[in-house]
Image: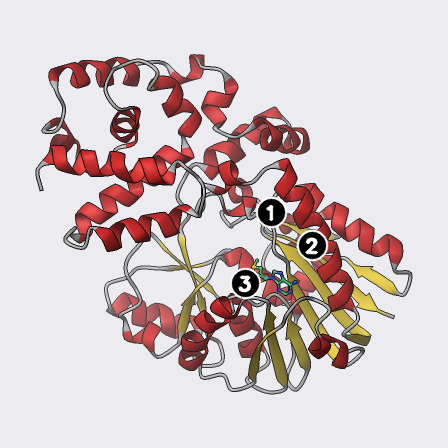
Amino acid sequence: MHPNALVDLAAELLRAVLKFDSPADGVVSAFFRKHRTLGPRERHTLAETAYAVVRQRMLFQHLAQSGSGPVERRLALLGWQGNEGFLRGALSPQEQAWLGEVQAIDRASLAPKLRHNLPDWLAQPLEQALGAQEFALLADSLNQPAPLDLRVNTYKGKRAEVQAALAAAGIESSPTPYSPWGLRVPGKPAINKLDVFTRGDVEVQDEGSQLLALITDAKRGEMVVDFCAGAGGKTLALGAAMRNTGRLYAFDVSGHRLDALKPRLARSGLSNVYPAQIAHERDERIKRLAGKIDRVLVDAPCSGLGTLRRNPDLKWRQSPQTVQSLKTQQAAILESAARMVKPGGRLVYATCSLLAAENEEIAAGFSDGHAEWSLLPVEPLLAGAKVAAAGDLVAGPFLRLWPHRHATDGFFAAVWERR
Ligand SMILES: C[S@@+](CC[C@H](N)C(=O)[O-])C[C@H]1O[C@@H](n2cnc3c(N)ncnc32)[C@H](O)[C@@H]1O
């Protein structure tokens, strides 16, 4: 394709993505379905350029105030993630001069919000929680792509064996620093055609997500509920920890997401998982399990702001209002899920949000209203699950993961035991 045509397509894609009326990954996929003839390299350039602009939207929109022509084209030039020489082939002499000028601007001289690229309502509580210096590190890490983490299906194989199988396929990996189940792979090699993937020895899963399953500590023969199972990332980890025994219910209100669990379940070799769509958190099915369950994991619907490395559009699509309505939902789901836990059983509340509003505040609300539950400090639970450096992963009694500190998504977890 001619360089200019590809830049024009990047501008067209940006016009759609920057509406922020639906998730960016869906917009990108729909765009590729419309432009079927695009090759893999062109798709990579277009998608990565769109993501780069979404990540640095404030900065790029500021810089794009100068120059002329459609603003999306200037944004595409600023965020270009393809070959530099190829890009030069698309530029007019005026565009070349403009790009040179704006790229020479010293970014350190710009206003803080143009450097961190976060909306005020989000920047403020994060800066308050971390202090200015560490907040800058967080903001920087949120603007980097995430590494590819894999979870070894320990029901089928050992981490060292999977690592060797990956190496034999030309893919280098290293054990994740905290999770005993994880491997980290540099770059983004396609792994879904490898035998080690198709036979279910390995799944793609962020190390932070693995740690949530580890602290849930589901054991052989137990009755376990993954309340917000979605496509089952944590379900599969729990089922493997249970060594394919006992009964593991995977509940979700979204049948569509549960459908995505099915092929993963088939690969995993697990037969102890019972996926079921529920109408809402007070569904009859939930009531029938009251007081019967050993472990309940609530991986609650949340703002997803701990996953900005992968889903940078969330910072523009969420708002104080959406967080407020999520908080109501989170408290209601936790309340309902708790009823299923039997005396001596464990309840885990987790999010992939960085905001105390969705984390510590929800946990405090639950503890305050429930004298019959003891909050369990997470550090010994992590250490008991053979997680290295457990003390580095907690804030007080809670699990608190940060992309800039732990190279994981930003997860939170609180754990209670029913007396
Ligand atoms: C953070 S996602 C779960 C991700 C999943 N656990 C995984 O590891 O892949 C939250 C899920 O909660 C589900 N959900 C939303 N409201 C719910 C409710 N009232 N009861 C159960 N699940 C709900 C959403 O459909 C979504 O799949």
Q: Is residue 341 left or right of residue 84?
A: right
Q: Residues within 10 Å of mark 3 (few under 14, many from 20)?
A: many
Q: Secondary structure at mark 1?
A: loop
What amino acid is at disc 2?
A: Gln
Q: Is residue 67 left or right of residue 365?
A: left
Q: Residues within 10 Å of mark 1 (few under 14, many from 20)?
A: many
Residue hosting label 3: 210
Q: Check the image and tell me how it is coloured.
A: secondary structure
Residue hosting label 2: 329
- The N terminus - image quarter: top left
CA separation in Å, label 1 and label 2:
14 Å
What amino acid is at disc 3?
A: Gln
Residue hosting label 1: 353
In percent of the image, x 64 and y 70: which residue is there? 279
Mark 1 or mark 2, earlier in chain = 2
Q: Position of residue 200 (x, y in %)?
A: 39, 77
Mark 1 or mark 3, earlier in chain = 3
